[in-house]
Image (spheres, rainbow, N blue to C red):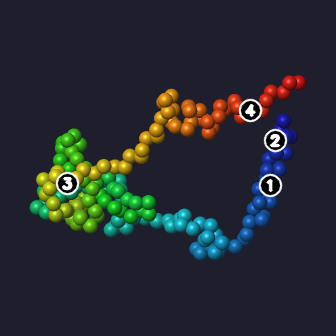
Amino acid sequence: MMKKLMTGAAIGALMVTGALAQAPNSPPSSNPPAAAQSQQGAGKADIVASQKPDQWLATKFKGTEVVSADDKKIGTIKDILFDKTGKIEAYVVSVGGFLGVGSKEVALAPASFEVIKGEKGSADKLKIAMSQEELKEAQNFTPYAPPRPTTTGSGAPAGLNGLSGGGTHPSSNRPPASSK
């Protein structure tokens, strides 16, 4: 048993060293070759090493106090709406209510807000040129809900008839039993 284990380990080590010997010995460059760039396309990874003073993390941004033009608290940031490219489309503000009960959500474009720096170490705030009453009257924000699949009379999604594998029974994919 030990002999088989040692032989397997030796073969594995030889396979790894053979693969490493085929790898190019050139040091990694900041600009990959054109062929590698075309393979990476839009999926190229740009690493961000640290947060800058003028940047916010979503974890800290959610819950940021929103104040009116007269500096009265009118809500908090509940969520951030962005498109598939990463562009922020709106900040969703929770307005009114008590501890989230009875509140409504209104989405406003980022240009609607002015950042007010916190004083003496307090958190930054966002100021808008609307009153709490105006926000309560604004249209509710509705998150996207994908359409539900239609069902057949059996209650299974249409086209599946309750079976997996494209509508065939898994046992039908097996070869016939031999008659030997």
Alpha carbons under labels 1 and 4: distance apart: 36 Å
Front disc: 2 or 1: 1
Amino acid under disc 2: Leu
Residue at the spot of label 2: 5
> Badge 3: how crowded within 10 Å, few (<14), some, or many (20+)?
few
> Badge 2: how crowded within 10 Å, few (<14), some, or many (20+)?
few
Amino acid under disc 4: Arg
Most distant residue in the right direction: 180
Residue 119 vs 8, above or below: the answer is below
Residue at the spot of label 1: 15
Residue at the spot of label 3: 138
Alpha carbons under labels 2 and 1: distance apart: 15 Å
Q: Which mark is residue 174?
A: 4
Q: Earlier in the sequence, mark 2 or mark 1?
A: 2
Front disc: 3 or 2: 3
Q: Nearer the viewer, residue 137 or 62?
A: 137
